[in-house]
Structures are given as C-alpha cells and as structure tokens.
Amino acid sequence: MASHEGRVKDKFRGAILGCFLGDAFGAALEGLDREEASRYLSDEFYGRYTDDTDMTLILAESIVDSRSVNPEDIAKKFALHCDLSRGYGKGTVKVIMALRAGMKWNEISGPLWEKASSGNGAAMRVSPVGLFFHDDPDELRTAALDQAIITHSHPLGQWGSVMQAASIGISLLQDPGSPPDAEEMVMRLRQILSPGPIEYLRSLDKIEGILGRGRVAETQEVAERLGNGFEAHLSVPSACYIAIAMAPDAKTAIRAAASLGGDTDTIAAMTGAIVGARVGEKGLPAEWIERLEDGPRGRSFARGLAEKLYETWKENHLAETH
Ligand SMILES: [Mg+2]
C-alpha cells in the first residue's frame, strides 16, 4: 500500500514539474516556425518558467485551499498572484486587470474574450485538476470546464482544458515504466470528450490513425495534421499525441513538442505534464530539473505544492471511502 501511495505522490510531482520543465524548455523557441524551432532546439535551456507554470501553481494552491475547484477563489488568486512579467498574452492580462479592478469573475470572460477565448490558456494550466480528479472522469470534466470559464468563453477553449486534464488523469492511472496503452487512452478520452465540440473528437480520430501505423510521426506531420497553434484545438491534441507516442521517454517527448514551432512553451508544458503524470518525477531527467529556477515560487515550491495537492486528494479520497 505504502509503495502504491508513494508512486501516486511521485506522479503528482511529475505532472507539475513536467509542466514547469516543458514550459522552461519551450520558452526560448516560442513563436518560431517549425524549421527554426528544430534548428535552435537546445538542451542548454534557461530555466525560467512563463505564464503556463505561473497559472498552474496558482490553480494548485486554490484547489489545496478550497479542497475543490472553486472559480471564485481561483479568480481571486489569479488577481493576487499572477506575475505579469511572465509572458502573459494580451487577453489574459485584460482579464487579470479587470479582476484587479474589482470586476466579478463571472462578468468578465464573455465581452473581453470575444476573439481570443478559444486559446489554449485554460488547458495549459489545468494539470492540478487532472491530478486531483484522476479517479472520477465526470468530476474531472466538470472541474476542467469550471476553471476554464473564468478566462475562456468559447467551447473550444473550455474543452481543450477537458482534453488536457483527462490526458493527465488517464496517464496517472497507467504504468510508469512501459509505453502507454494507446488504444485504452484514446477510448477513455473519447468517452470524456463525447459531449464536447466535434473538433476534439476529430482530433482523436487523427491521433488514432497515426498511432495505428505503428511508427512515430515526424514533427512536420504532427504540426500539419494536429497543429502547433495558440488555439486549444490546434495544440492540445498535438501534446496528447506526442505524450502517448513517446512516453516513457520524457526528454524525447519535450524535445519533439518544442520542435513543432508555434506555441512551443505551452505545447511542451502540456506534453511534459502528461508524460510526468505517467512517469513521475523519478522518470523525468534530473539534470533538466536541476536547471529550473528555484526562487520563492520555483522548483522546490512547485514540488512542495504538488505534494500538498496529493495530501489534499488523499484526505478527500479517504473521507469518501470511509
Ligand atoms: Mg507561456
């Protein structure tokens, strides 16, 4: 029992640190096209995280404090803690400024997010939800939508959050050492995503088709067929495919995600989180983790927060089963 618990706890750390790692690794290449990103890809990355990890940590803190997903508390914490020097997009800055000015979270996202609401900002931060609800797909779906709605009014932005959270939850339940059971993973993703937009179900068909060939796709094909963009439906499926095709090799997966070009930090952060939920911190490259910044909200803080999230999940879980 103790070793099983230790393994689950390590997977919580793996997903949060995997997000951090992918984010920092991909940040140097953000906005380059695929050929440029492949050319400049380097293991000598600077370990500074961006908005993806910043929001992930805040969401994890809110879940620990609320013992659930509470949009009001999340919005309050976004207003208090988002560090706008960390590469936030214009749309998110607008939402955070509105929250800081005292607007209510449920009065903002519609009018302000008319154009950018299908972006991947809700998906990039959702790993704590995938971890916390890994044992309940229906609650996972509801919680992923609830946390997305604060900033994303468009269903594509909201359901990208569901696909990413579900990929993390399913990965956590799979064996860390062996390659993922791709068929099982796609089948479970389809069940969770079935009430959502057709775009995600189509992307699962494409993922299934590529996986069915039995060889890993080139980055060009992944970028062209699944996407490398800033919109959720053109980035979450790519992260999900790469994580399935390349786990348990976290380094190869993060390199592949960053070499897609486009929104490299977010796609690599999402890939790192999914792979990390499978392999745990033990399966992530220690020499890369060492490179991550370690200031007040750096890698030690992130690791400790992942452990608190695990403890909170365990207490809730025990309360439900006794
Ligand atoms: Mg970023």
Image (tube, helix red, strand yellow):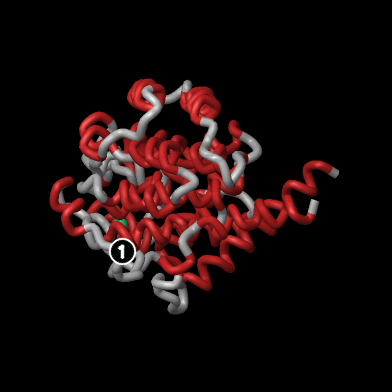
Q: What residue did someone put label 1 on?
A: 43
Spot occupied by residue 220 in the image (x, y as percentages of width and height): 21, 37
- Say which residue appears at 55% left-offset and 46% top-offset: 278
* Quarter of the rendered structure image containing ligand 1: bottom left
**Residue in the image at 25% along x and 49% along y:** 259
Split into 4 quadrants, where in the image is the C terminus?
top right
- Quick one: which residue is furthest to the front in this view? 215
Quarter of the rendering containing residue 143 = top right
Mark 1 residue element: loop
Q: Residue 245, image x and y in percent?
A: 41, 37
Q: Amino acid at mark 1?
A: Asp
Mark count: 1
Is residue 84 something that shows in the picture? yes
Residue 134 appears left or right of 292: right
Q: Could you tell me which residue is drawn at 24 percent across and 32 percent down?
A: 221
**Distance from mark 1 CB to nearest ligand 1 atom below 8 Å:** no
Percent from the top left, x then y, of residue 1?
Answer: 80, 51
Judge by depth and name the residue closer to the eye, 100 or 113: 113
Along the line of sight, which residue is nearer the eye, 160 or 280? 280
Give the side of residue 97 with respect to residue 31, left or right.
right
Note whether 243 is above or below 213 in the view shown: below
Name the foreground residue: 106 vs 322. 322
Q: Position of residue 139 (x, y in %)?
A: 60, 36
